[in-house]
Amino acid sequence: MPAYRAPLRDMHFVFDEVLDAYATLQTLPSQREFGNDLGGAILEEAAKLAENVLAPLNASGDQQGCQYDPQTKAVKVPDGFRSAYQQFAQGGWTALACEPEFGGQGLPHVLNMMVEEMVCSANLSLGMYPGLTHGAINALTAHGTRAQQEQYLPKLISGEWTGTMCLTEPQCGTDLGLIRTRALPNADGSYAISGTKIWITGGEHDLADNILHLVLAKLPDAPNSVKGISLFLVPKFLACGTRNGAFCGGLEHKMGIKGSATCVMNFEGAQGWLIGEPNKGMSCMFTMMNSARLMVGMQGLGIAENAYQISLGFARERLQGRALSGPKMADKPADSIMVHPDVRRNLLRQKVMIEGCRALAYFTGLQMDVAHQHQDPEVRERADDLLQLLTPVVKSFLTDEGFNCANDGLQVLGGSGYTQDWGIEQLVRDSRITRIYEGTNGIQALDLVGRKLGLGGGRAVRSYFALIEGWLQAHPHAPHGTALAQAFKQLQQATLWIVTQGMQDPEQAGAAATPYLRLFALVSLAWFWARMAAVAQQQLAAGSSETAFYSAKVKSADFYMSRVLTESSGLLAEVTAGKASLMAFSDEEFAA
């Protein structure tokens, strides 16, 4: 089985050459000295950690899984995970993009996303422990009191402690207004938290000294809806060292990510403290969720990359049959399966989706840094609009394609892929959850059409469309400009249909949401592929010595435009077909 190797060359191509990200970042006050020397060195070190420390534990972590002791209610992570996590934390990787005031390194958020991609490629289960902690860090940074920040953020940022997001309950998932967990005021200003939460990543483990649970609960006089939800911080161990009443009731029996402890958590009058204002927990939660959704998108991208490397390595070595045009390896008993068109189709589809998704993800991450730090409020607003608009697209589309790439990769391996010997069946299992948690991809599509298209009275989507249109006007002779312009027109038509029809009937927007998000993503990737092809052509014309790398970009753009972007016509038709064929069925007719 090929060992994972971080795709540093392509990462640098997107970041440095296509997005010119260093120039953008250096306009921000805290990043004026951040250049490719520092960024490149950090990525090199992250690659070594992912390849040499995290990746070797991926298969064993899946096979061993986490172990729950019902007597002590403790969870033991797979062998090697604790040491690897400590090496990760002690190396400063948990602190990369966090505030220096509390021990962070203050580096760009987009750089942290790039590191997350490598971590998720190497070992998704292990990467989830520090990944979810960032949600807690972001919530406390945005909504915690000064005292809470000083008490908890340094430990979270250093990785000495980890954090969780405790939202879901047995009777409610997306509809959080149905939660039953209650918070009763204590005389000292704290609260007694009681209730059960399920599917809690990292709810209990032996990686760190303490776990801080961020728990959604309702106060006694709270409205019986999402407007009555508050957020509370509940430590596993209190400041005095006493064990708090927050216990793991068991582990979920899962399809994948078995090295990640997914817990049932019972809060038995646990002492907690309010974060933010009473009944304003949903806004605090979305601070956690938005960063987590981008992280999950990177999980999809990371798994796709690993699957591609495995399937490409196998295809190069596997001898089977002869090329349809005649033998290519006459000195061998058969040709490698690389000669077969359908194998190439599977491989190239993985390649172009991964590289296009990487460009979309890094572009989105760059908007986060600009939105947080740029000195011009109008620039910050525009970047935040783009970040809000693209977050559901990154989460949904990258995880859809992460699973598709893993599935296509398994197909390349055939029967070998269905066994545990090559590791790709684990990637198929691991990737499937990414389309579900942190808001299912159907929910992401509803978020895009129901909230994000209307953001700022349509300001966000107009701003994004203006970027694509402006690029087309500035590059009239760009490669594949005509194909991009045609698909972009289809996206505009679909957007207009949703805006007009959805205002009259919300079910119309709901019926169109999933195909619309995919159309939105495919056109976005077409824009980035046109840009990548243009850069590659310029490098080839300038006599670059990396002929294979840049010519592959040009040919990949050809493949994307001729074999993937062609979906856009069908997606437009599906969007404008309306709800009739979906909503016409009665409940009885589904089983008829």
Image (cartoon, rainbow, N blue to C red):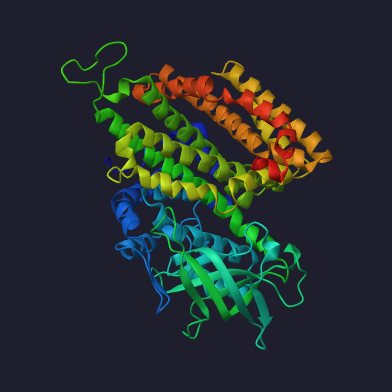
Q: Quadrant of the C terminus?
A: top right
- Give x and y (percent) for residue 516: 66, 35
Q: Quadrant of the N terminus?
A: top left
Q: Looking at the image, which residue sits at the far bottom?
A: 187
Report whether residue 379 is seen. no
On screen, residue 338 above or below 199: above
- Give x and y (percent) for residue 529: 52, 27
Residue 419 lies in what quarter of the image? Answer: top left
Indicate left or right for 150 with 544 as reference: right
- Give x and y (percent) for residue 550: 40, 24
Indicate left or right for 221 with 100 as reference: right
Q: Residue at x 32, y 60 (%)?
A: 64
On screen, residue 65 above or below 474: below
Q: Looking at the image, which residue sits at the far front?
A: 592
Residue 81 lies in what quarter of the image? Answer: bottom left
Q: Looking at the image, which residue sits at the far left?
A: 331
As rendered, which of 323 and 490 lies closer to the eye? 323
- Give x and y (percent) for residue 570: 63, 25
Report whether residue 303 is seen. yes
Q: Residue at x 42, y 38 (%)?
A: 407
On screen, residue 569 above or below 458: above
